[in-house]
Image (tube, rainbow, N blue to C red):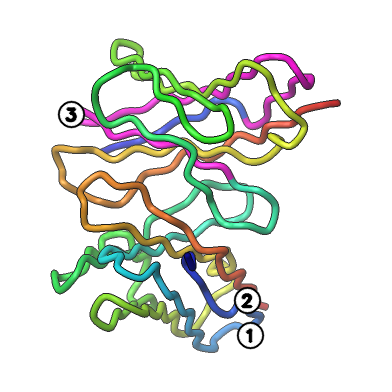
Amino acid sequence: GAGVSQSPSNKVTEKGKDVELRCDPISGHTALYWYRQRLGQGLEFLIYFQGNSAPDKSGLPSDRFSAERTGESVSTLTIQRTQQEDSAVYLCASSTSERYNEQFFGPGTRLTVL
Amino acid sequence: AQSVAQPEDQVNVAEGNPLTVKCTYSVSGNPYLFWYVQYPNRGLQFLLKYITGDNLVKGSYGFEAEFNKSQTSFHLKKPSALVSDSALYFCAVRDIPTGRRALTFGSGTRLQVQP
């Protein structure tokens, strides 16, 4: 079946512009996660959605970052007034609601802020 | 707070030899532990997980990992390495008592298998 998809695959923007990244989770997966991977580093948790519960936003690095999810489907991560340090690969993952199921990752969006 | 350490940035091994990629963790209670692999220009792929039960966990592509509670380790192993195993490997942990679903990842270990 289809995996997690993300768009765009690459995004180049100028400092100060806003960007929107999209994630389509696996159908039926109620949990959705956003992570950031800076060059040569591990993944940093950003935000987590589970069904209709309030999202866990504890990983968002600043108020320039926000995310939304419509029901149990598509999610968008928005970065306002982008800075050069925002350059990274943004990875989305989804999982079933079962408490210890593994997360399935999308291919990521590579964001470059000039 | 939970954390994961992967002490080796890179591991080099000859094809056909056994490989080990090290991982140690720190959590407040019992952990859920995971290994993921990342091939160039691709997302992370799940390899295996430890939740409870047998300390030796078998996963995809012939990989296995051993959970050692006393040493707080979860090393990834394979008896005979293949050139195609060359990739970036990440260990990750979920701290069960906190109920937090997000994974905490190590910094990754690059595995290079030489022909």
- Image coordinates for residue B81, horizontal then vertical, percent: 70, 23
Q: Amino acid at mark 2?
A: Val
> Callout 1: helix, strand or loop?
loop
Task: Identify which residue is drawn at 67% across, 40% down.
Answer: B87
Q: CA distance from mark 3 to mark 1?
A: 44 Å
Q: Amino acid at mark 3?
A: Gly
> Callout 2: helix, strand or loop?
strand
Which contiguous range is marked in magenta?
B9-37
Pointers 2 and 1 in contact (CB under 8 A)? Answer: yes
Query: Which one is nearer the viewer's eye here, B79 or B23?
Result: B79
Residue B70 sits in which quadrant?
A: top left
Q: Which label is found at residue A113?
A: 2
Task: Identify which residue is drawn at 57% across, 38% down.
Answer: B89
- Image coordinates for residue A57, horizontal then vertical, percent: 26, 66
Q: Amino acid at mark 1?
A: Glu
> Callout 3: helix, strand or loop?
loop
Query: Which one is nearer the viewer's eye here, B25 or A80?
Result: B25
Which dot, 3 or 1, sits closer to the camera? 3
Mark 1, residue position: A14
Report in which chain the residue with disc 1 lies: A
As for residue B25 lying within the magenta part, the answer is yes
Q: Relative to A47, does residue A21 appear above or below in the rendering? A: below
Which dot, 3 or 2, sits closer to the camera? 3
**For the residue carrying disc 2, how many other residues have a C-alpha within 10 Å: few (<14), some (14-19), or many (20+)?**
some
Q: Quick check: A20 left or right of B102?
A: right
Q: CA distance from mark 2 to mark 1?
A: 5 Å
Mark 3, residue position: B29
Query: Which one is nearer the viewer's eye here, A20 or A103?
Result: A103
Q: Quick check: A9 left or right of A51?
A: right
Disc nearer the start of the sequence (2/1): 1
